[in-house]
Amino acid sequence: MKITRHLASDASGFARAGDLLRAGGLVAFPTETVYGLGADATDGLAVAGIYAAKGRPSFNPLIVHVAALEQALTLADFNADALRLAKAFWPGPLTIVVPRRADCPVSELALAGLDSIALRIPSAPEALALLKAAGKPIAAPSANRSGRVSPTTPDHVLEDLDGLIDAVVMGPSAEVGVESTIVSCLVHPPVMLRPGGLAREAIEAELGCRLADPGASDDDQAAPLAPGMLLSHYAPRAKVRLNVHTIEEGEAVLLFGSVSMPGLARSVATLNLSPSGDLAEAAAALFGALRTLDASGASSIAVAPVPSHGLGEAINDRLHRAAAPRN
Ligand code: TXA
Ligand code: MG
């Protein structure tokens, strides 16, 4: 067991986090999407520590976070699509997959042996401050045990990883609340590998073309384009039932918008992602709500329908994975 330090979300905390990262440590930190578990991406041993702390299958490559576009350009080759997306949406909740440069110093382990690299500049000021303090590309998956619900607060991180990592930056709740959208620019038109915090509509408007779909990437059996997109993911302990219109005895309930539902009075716990029907508010509340309802002890969480446009695509993707049969 390690002692997991709680670092203040201020200049001295970011400086300490930078020191720990440069020394090969594991530091969880806020981004606008979810909390990340960071390590120096160029240090194979430090990256190995991420896989160990998360209990993550090692074939799953990591997103590499940088503070500026110039830094990203030293790691990978950006074609016109990639450059266009980076200029329009960075810093922000978009990860871009591009060919890595031959001299890219990121460890093979972080890339899981691929010739491509997934890059992101986060917009949360705390994340940018930490990346600048570290002065290195930082590999960071979501700061949860593998397969569990992603963390949107420092407390969520500590629930999963206390004693397993060196430090947590005690920052604010993640503003977006679902992971970044991942777009591969290895082909044209680019492919959306994972819906996330940046809506498909915004990306397609910027590119002036439709994004292609990854096809079989949703399937556990196929070799997915985003290798980490296993179907069962974001799994609470409780079973998850989707698109319900009636509540069963003893269920916890997750609502969206102003719905009324037969059997609601029977629920052991009820939360509404957004009573006004705002998808951005719902995305920000999603993972915390799943954790809270899971903690109610209900054996099943019943989820009302959520529209699938805008951030609804990412919300439905995460709910679908939370409801998938466990492996
Ligand atoms: O919002 C986010 O993206 C958060 C924060 C911390 O930045 N990070 C995150 O990382 O969600 P993670 O490790 O949970 O998800 C990374 C995803 C996986 O599905 C992985 O397979 C995919 O990115 N990925 C990484 N490198 C890739 C590559 N070269 N080609 C295709 N997919 C890649
Ligand atoms: Mg994750």
Image (tube, grey):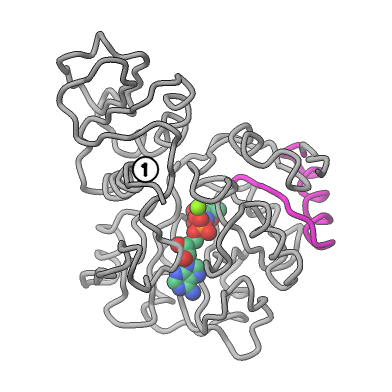
Compared to residue 167, the image places residue 22 above or below, namely below
Give me the residue at 71% from left, 41% from top. Answer: 169
Q: Is residue 245 left or right of residue 83?
A: left
- Residue at x 31% of width, y 75% of height: 190
The spot of residue 55 in percent (x, y) is 61, 54
Q: In which quarter of the image is residue 236?
A: top left
- Is residue 95 in sight in this rendering? no
In the figure, residue 93 lies in which quadrant? bottom left
Q: In this view, does 146 lie above or below 46?
A: above
Given residues 324 and 196, the one toward you in this image is 324
Task: Report if residue 29 lies within the magenta region.
Answer: yes
On the question of residue 279 being in view, the answer is yes
Taking the magenta stretch, the answer to whether it contains residue 14 is yes
Where residue 18 appears, as percent x and y from the top left, is 78, 56
Foreground residue, 131 or 298?
298
Q: Nearer the viewer, residue 85 or 50?
A: 50
The residue furthest bottom is 102
Please report the residue visible at 38 percent of the width from the left and 68 percent of the height from the top: 183
Say what secondary structure mark 1 lies in: helix
Residue 161 as seen in the image, left or right of residue 57 = right
Q: In this view, does 142 lie to the left or right of 184?
A: right
Quadrant of the frame with the N terminus: top right
Q: In which quarter of the image is residue 305?
A: top left
Crowd around label 1: few <14 · some 14–19 · many ≥20 (10 Å) = many
Q: Tell me the kind of residue under disc 1.
A: Ala
In the rendered image, residue 54, in percent from the top left (x then y), is placed at 62, 52
- Say left or right for 214 vs 152: left
Query: From this viewpoint, which residue is outermost toward the top?
Result: 265
Stretch of the chain drawn in magenta: 7-30
How many numbered markers are drawn?
A: 1
Residue at image mark 1: 322
x and y, in percent, of residue 6 in the image: 77, 36
